[in-house]
Image (cartoon, rainbow, N blue to C red):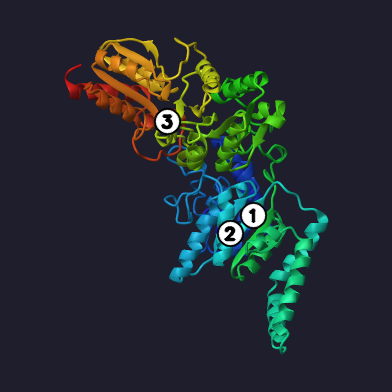
Amino acid sequence: MSTLAKKIENIKYLNEQGLNDLAEELRALIIKTITQNGGHLASNLGVVELTMALFYVFNFPEDRIVWDVGHQAYVYKILSDRLEKFATIRQPGGISGFPKTEESIYDAFNTGHSSTSISAALGIATAKHLSGELGKVIAVIGDGALTGGMAFEALNHAGHLKEDLIVILNDNEMSIAPNVGAISQYLTNLRTAPKYRQKKIQIQNFVRKIPFVGEQMVKVAEKLKNSLKHLLMSGELFEQFGFTYIGPIDGHNLTKVIKILQRVRELSGPVLIHCITKKGKGYAPAEESPNNYHGIAPFTMEDEEEPSKDQTRSFTKVFGEKILAMAKEKPDIVAITAAMVSGTGLDQFSLSFPERFFDVGIAEEHAVTFAAGLAIAGRRPVVAIYSTFIQRAIDQIIHDVALQKLPVIFVLDRAGFVGADGETHHGLFDTALLAAIPNLVLMAPKNAQELEEMLELAYELKQPVVLRIPRGIADSNTLASKVELGKLETIQKGKDIAFLTYGSIYSQAQQAIKILENEYSCGLYNLRFAKPLDEVSLALIAKQYKLLVTVEEEMLIGGIGCMLNSILQKLEIITPTLSLGVDNCFVTHGSQKGLQELCKLDAVNIAEAVLWKIKGQHNV
């Protein structure tokens, strides 16, 4: 057993110096691993002491913990049972960058999206209560995740149920002002100290026995105490939800955090601990630029410069540049995102038009309906949200945008495979979820120029439009034809097999055609639109070819292949079809190229699937 493994195994018996030494070793391990593998660096460096204190005080997995989003759970993975596997994090076949119940008994709940932890933890706590199980339940939620409405719904319900639930607010944006910090620390110690609580109960019981006025005196005293407490502390909001509020506390002071957790462990009912931490703690570049070190690609540490950014034009960059250019000419354009300013390419827009830019925080549902309000009042909102996160706002798209046919432009970034973030972050469901909604136009560009033209068209249409764009570099090739609503693009014609693609996956189909071209004459068609589909052109194509092959980087159920077969059935066309996409499964983490191969959407597998289909048909 390594020295580090021994320290982790004996964490509950380490003295203060031993704990501080372990904290430094954990930081060094995380920095070394993430610089090699890529991942979430700043957020994990910020919770080292907090996570250690939790392991020092609580008994996992008998006690259960839910990490909101989960990208800050690396330390937890190391301290539980994955030290030896940590070098494989986010690698193909390795451990996930997020909590996964199938990965370890220590992971209480799968996370990856924001603002879910309190709801899940409350459910676990309630189940424990109903079954008489021992053990505490903890939710760790960041200040950013707390902007999500679901978190407040859970706080409200938790206060009503009064279950034993500990919520730790990991606040890495606010600082502790000396006066507020000193007073709140004193009140925290006073309110949680066992002797204080015992004495408080004794006094209350004594006063209650005073004839006629005892109970009223207790109520008046409690009211006065609460008024003073709320005047001196910032926890009134959480107290109103029914929580015992404790904090703010310095999340990097191990001794104090351990002491608070030991006392809170003895309390009953819902408790919220306001813990102040610093993103990137212990690694100067990450402390100075935490946003740049949130989710990073592998990099070297020799000169401790910020991770390099790829200077080539990604789809995200093309979108950001184009919408900025359009906004300069069209003053009614406004842009909205949900806590992903840089990730969605809107950083320059936010600087150029701050009064026309809105970051609503982690609140996708609000973002959509807010956009609907802007649209109905004459503005042209562009809502840029990752495909995986728009899933949260399907009802708002249906009820508040599509039903009223409001001209909101949705740009869904990270559509398709996103890579190492895995199941919770791939954008594979948007077409299937949105295609059934009336009044929506769905389109996907295959390259940079097509994206630019689609944005122009979306503005002209004056109805709800959805553009799905992938993560990665945008091909700069020119178009064979101008983008027109509901019209596909003919890239090349053939006689035997017609490939119908949607989005940037066309490049893999193009390569597959080269593999097959010595034996078969293949046509390649870029659909451009999932809705409306070009039924007239598709009918003609279906009559000209012996096999139709759809290729899409999304779910097959509800995808382009399903739509095509529905059209052929309606038109009573019997041309055989082959639909290639993601076959009703959650896709693990890995490189985008590796995941295409895994799901058989790379050129070689596409060609092989076509050959197998041909052998089965015997008529091509």
Residue to which mark 3 is pinned? 594
Residue 88 in view of the camera: no
| Amino acid type for the residue under numbered disc 3 | Gly
Q: CA distance from mark 2 to mark 1?
A: 16 Å
Residue 466 horizontal/vertical position (percent): 49, 29
Which secondary structure, mark 2?
helix
Q: Which quarter of the figure is the C terminus placed in?
A: top left
Residue 231 horizontal/vertical position (percent): 78, 62
| Amino acid type for the residue under numbered disc 1 | Leu
Labels 2 and 1: the sequence-earlier one: 2
The answer to which of 378 and 331 lies nearer the viewer is 378
**Left or right of 469, for residue 317:** right
141 vs 572: above or below: below
**Picture residue at 72% right of the left edge, 88% below the top:** 210
**Left or right of 456, for residue 571:** left
Viewer-nearest of labels 3 and 1?
1
| Amino acid type for the residue under numbered disc 2 | Asn
**Left or right of 56, for residue 600:** left
**Picture residue at 46% right of the left edge, 64% below the top:** 127
The answer to which of 475 and 40 lies nearer the viewer is 475
Q: Residues within 10 Å of mark 3 (few under 14, many from 20)?
A: some
Residue to which mark 1 is pinned? 169
Viewer-nearest of labels 2 and 1?
2
Which secondary structure, mark 3?
helix
**Picture residue at 51% right of the left edge, 54% below the top:** 1
Residue to which mark 2 is pinned? 156
Q: CA distance from mark 3 to mark 1?
A: 37 Å
Labels 3 and 1: the sequence-earlier one: 1
**Picture residue at 51% right of the left edge, 41% below the top:** 396
Which residue, as the protein is rendered here, is positioned at the far right?
A: 179
